[in-house]
Each structure stands twice: as structure tokens, then as C-alpha cells.
Image (spheres, coloured by chain):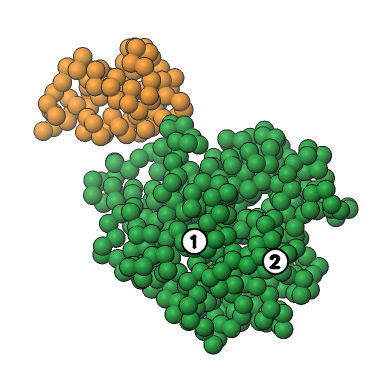
Amino acid sequence: MKERRVVVTGTGLITPFGIGSEKFWDAISSGRSAITRIGEFDSSQLKCQIAGACYEFDPAFFLDPDDFRRMDRVSQFAVAAGALAVTESRLPTNSHDTGIIIGTGLGGITTDDAQHALLHTKGPRFVVPTAIPMIMYNAAASHISTRFGFKGPGYTITTACASGTQAIGEAYRLIKHGYADAMIAGGADAPLSFGIFSAWCALRVLSTRNDSPATACRPFSHDRDGMVLAEGAGIVILEELQHAINRYSPLYAEVLGYGSSNDAFHITHPDVDGEARAMGNALKDAGLPPEDIDYINAHGTGTKINDLAETKAIKKVFQKRAYSVPISSTKSMIGHAMGGAGAIEFIVCCLSLKHDLIPPTINYYVNDPECDLDYVPNVPRGQTLNIAMSNSFGFGGTNAVLILKKLICGGAL
Amino acid sequence: MTLQDSESIEEQLKELIVQEFRIDRSKISHDSKVKELGRDSLAVLELLAAVEAQFEISIPDEEVPRISSFGSLVDSIEKHLKMKSDSA
């Protein structure tokens, strides 16, 4: 069978910067922060009291009240981002040839948290009958596919922070190998519940710069003190190239490669070899040498351990090129949206290629002798970009990397 | 909750259904099918949970299939309120 090429024809974003990609790009391309004090619950007892929350999001804008009250916030995000992506791509709905893969690290955790509170304060009969369909991890995929009638292959991926990237990568493979002509794929998480926040605080990986939310997340900077939790969703439409051309759909970028690996090392500690193998696998799949990568959107969480391991992994794969390839962490601006993060960052790469502009790593104040690469500190950088790489490394040891190429409409494909 | 007459239970139940199913009160009659008032089978379960909370009763699982109409739900509520009052 002739090699099938896979392109991105639609993007949908729900982020702490608001609804859609325009506001999002406007903010991250100018280096603004979306991190604020937590308003969802009383955080006074917590060491970390800041997050990237989607305060502008109103489910009523996208959904009927009877529908959204039966959805956890994670499904509301996913359906809304999915609707934006479908609209943008003009992908026909009600199709047996369109499948779905959604990644989520924690599923309907806000509902889970709230129902547990009811259980323990009022008793078991106060747990609502819709709790299970709201909490289950595949609820988001079910709601999107039901809403748009996408009846092709469908599943849900949960590999912590790599979930969204793996969802897009596996969707790309299904199209490439002929199992579907189009896929809706991406990731979502809504982890800003009291219970989950407390659990993250207990893990001692969150920034405690509560007095300065906007400058709290400092990936690769020597004075970094942890990551900042966020919520949101990124959903894309992937299509086989000819399928997209035949229906005159917008073309954003081509997915050139996807690589995944498992550390088989530790439940939370990153592994340089595992991360390097994922990048290497993606380059091999794309048939590219490291020199061809123009930009790396880093996992870049802002923890001491992650940023050092990622730097070492990039050096291992890119060798000399590691010192000249621009690398940035957009988590410095929106925080870490867990299963949504990789998908949001994949869209960052699409937008960077489109605009020939690299969003910066903001809050980079102090050079770290061990993190000595070009992290595009504080200031966005305009330069011609053809190929970008997006890294996601999840707790549990799952690593996923995607490589995208600019598509020039009207030019040679 | 003190023992209530059928009329009072009916009125309270109608109010609950209006709130839960977001439908017009005039659509509810003694013979209305509960499944048809709500949008799907989950809606019926949501209504039963609301009924249990409001009337502070517990409707056993095996009784649920027999609750098909608005009238039979009123009967069920009445029965369980009486059982609760007798055992108090």
C-alpha cells in the first residue's frame, strides 16, 4: 500500500487563556502568564495555592444544560474543544470512517472528589446515579463521538502527562496504516479539585511561589521550584492527506513522526534513556536526522528533576545540535494541564510553524549550569520554522514524542 | 417527615419532576409514563435518587421495574412513608 500521509485540518483549544486558538496564540506568542490564585476552593491550608484555571470557560456556550450537568468538567472541556476543531476543519459528521482517541490522566476526578465528599458527609444514598458515567475515563470520548456521530475506531488513553500526545500519535498511526481516514484526537484534564490538589501538594512537586503566580513556573531556570497545575483541553482533527485535499479542508501541518517508549524504571522518577528513546523513535518514524528539527516544545514542567532529565535526553539524541536547537516550555505560561498538556503543546507546534514564531520560556531568570541549552528565554523568537518536535513524559514512565512539518498551501505537498 | 396524604405527595413529586426533567407541569398526569417524562433511563434513576432524598425513604431495586407511571411512583412513595412511620 502506498504510504498514507497524515495532516492536521482542525484545532480546538480550551485553556487558561480562554476559548480557541486565537486568544491562546496571542498570549503565548507574547509571553504572558495565565497562572493565578486558586478560586475553585479554599486553598488556605495548602502549600501551593496557584493554578492555571479556565475561568472564561462556560459550558452553556457549547452545551445544553441537560447535557453538561451530566458531564464532568473534563468532558465539558473535551466536547467544547472537539466542537471547535470540527468546526474549523469542516469535517463531515456522522461517519463510519472517522474515529476518536482521547487522552486523559485523571478522567472525571472533580466529580469523583465531590461524590466522595457526599458519601462521607451525608451517606451512600446521596451519591448520584450519574456518578459512574461522569467519572469513567472514556466519558469524554463517548460524549464527543455521540455528539458528532464519529463511528470509527475509538478508545481512551491514560498515561498521565503523556496521554494527549499518545492519543494524537496513535490516531496518526491508525490513519497512516489505513484503519481510518480521519480521526478526532487529543487530550483533556480538569484536575483542579481539592482532593487532587492536596495529593499533588503531598508529592512536593508544585511551585509554592503563591505571592507571585505569574512568575511561579520557571522551567529550566536554576531557581525553578516546581510545576503549576492547570486544566484544559486540546483536540485536533487528523486526516489522510488526499481525504483532506478532496474536501478542500484547511491544512495546518503534516504529522511526520511519532515515537513512544516506556522507562520500565520508576513510577514517578524520569529516565533519561527512556525519554531519549522516545525522541529517537519519533525521528526514525519521520525518517529525519536530529539536525532537521527547527524547534522543540519541551515537556518542561519546571521541576528540578524533569528539566534536568529532559536536557540530558535532548543532548543524548541531538548531540552537537542540542546546543543550537531552540527549546521552549509553554508550561511556563499556562501550567501543566496533565493529559491535556501534550495535545495543547502539539497545537502550539502547529501554530508556531504557521506563524514562524517560537513562544518563549518565560520566567527564566538564572542560568543553570546543568541545563545549558537554548531555552528561548523570556522573549518570543521569530524565525523560519519547517519542522517541530513536541515532547511529553508521563508519570509511570510513558514517553511520547510527535514531529510535525509545516504545510504550505498552494505549494508542493 | 409526617405522614402525608396522596395529594400532597403528588404535588411534591410533580415539582420534583419539573425540576429534574425540566418539563412543563401540565404534561404530568396520573398515567404519565416516567420513562417518557425524562429523556432516558438515567433520568429515571436521577428522579428516584431525588425522590429518596426528598422523602427520606429508600426504594429497593426490585421495586424499580414496577414503577412505570407517575401514579405508581406516588403509590410507592406513599407505601414507604407509611412503612417508615409505622416503624418509628
In the displayed structure image, the side of residue A60 where residue B19 appears, left or right? left
Kindly identify which residue carries mark 1: A32
State which quadrant residue A290 falls in. bottom right
Task: Please determine if labels 2 and 1 lie on a single subunit.
Answer: yes
**Which residue is depicted at the point 75% across and 60% down?**
A405
**Which residue is depicted at the point 56% across and 69% down?**
A379
Indicate the chain coloured orange by its letter: B
- Residue found at the far bottom of this picture: A369
Q: Secondary structure at mark 1?
A: loop
**Which residue is depicted at the point 36% across and 71% down?**
A209
Query: Around disc 1, counting alpha carbons within 10 Å, would you say few (fewer than 14), some (14 to 19), or many (20 or more)?
Result: many
Q: Earlier in the sequence, mark 2 or mark 1?
A: 1
Q: Depth check: A177 or B71 in front?
A: A177
Q: Depth check: B86 or A204 in front?
A: A204
Kindly identify which residue carries mark 2: A383
Determine the colour of chain A: green
Q: What chain letter is assigned to the residue under label 2?
A: A
In the displayed structure image, the side of residue A94 where residue A411 appears, left or right? right
**Residue A25 drawn at (x, y percent):** 57, 54
**Which residue is depicted at the point 75% across and 51% down?**
A7
**Residue A313 drawn at (x, y percent):** 63, 79
